[in-house]
Image (cartoon, grey):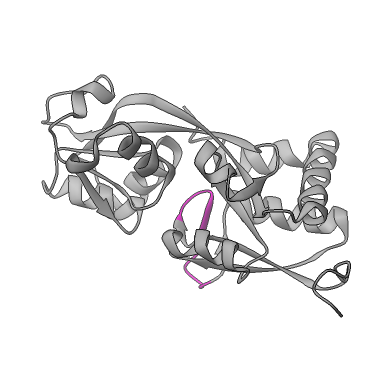
Amino acid sequence: GSADAPRDRHRTIVVGGDRDYPPYEFIDQNGKPAGYNVELTRAIAEVMGMTVEFRLGAWSEMFSALKSGRVDVLQGISWSEKRARQIDFTPPHTIVYHAIFARRDSPPAAGLEDLRGRKVALHRDGIMHEYLAERGYGKDLVLTPTPADALRLLAAGGCDYAVVAMVPGMYIIRENRLTNLVPVARSIAAQRYGYAVRQGDAELLARFSEGLAILRKTGQYEAIRAKWLGVLEP
């Protein structure tokens, strides 16, 4: 029908996400979408009677895929004032804490001020890229396609520090055996992380918000959270 006709309730909803942001969302060894966000989305789809299809890709492309309509919803994106002017967010399902990682032999960094004038690796177009660029760190940043790339670069001596979300950072260090890396400042920023839709897509926003509220009441939300994040959360 016409563009402004109500959405067909049985249409498949395309859910976008990051292919390299474990344990929140990632492509597993079998090439399948996996992680906390993916399981949360499946549970929401089930309680709300929606059909979803996942499209996980490079993060910097995913944000534009939402705005251009190639995906209907992003399942894990950090809120910022700048982003909220372009897309609409549900209430957050998670608070993501960001940390400074260093090599064991590096001088420790207690906070963001200690990063000035140092080479700092981080995820391109992630929330901390936006956050640090706004605070004048632009020239110090070494941007990588994924958080894992930032941590590998740090492990190899290619930069002084990396800024990565705490839980993904610990997960990546463990999975890749980057045994020379440690978090030196564990909570330099707390970002509200949740679903987002294209601006004005109130119906889809309401369905995801309602689904999330139901999961909190039934205890499924807590179970999914404990399974994926329980052992890793600071």
Question: Quarter-wise, where is residue 188 in the image?
Answer: top left
Magenta residues (range): 21-31
In the picture shown, does residue 176 fall above or below 134? below
Residue depicted at 66% across the width and 38% down the height: 93
Residue depicted at 69% across the width and 50% down the height: 40
In the picture shown, does residue 71 fall above or below 74? below
Q: Is residue 13 left or right of residue 155?
A: right
Along the viewing direction, whichever of 65 and 179 lies nearer the viewer: 65
Quadrant placement of the N terminus? bottom right
Residue depicted at 35% across the width and 45% down the height: 174
Say whether residue 24 is magenta.
Answer: yes
Q: Is residue 123 left or right of residue 137?
A: right
Residue 107 at least partly seen: yes
Q: Is residue 154 left or right of residue 226?
A: left
Residue 80 at least partly seen: no
User: Where in the figure is residue 12, as x and y percent of width and height?
Assistant: 77, 72
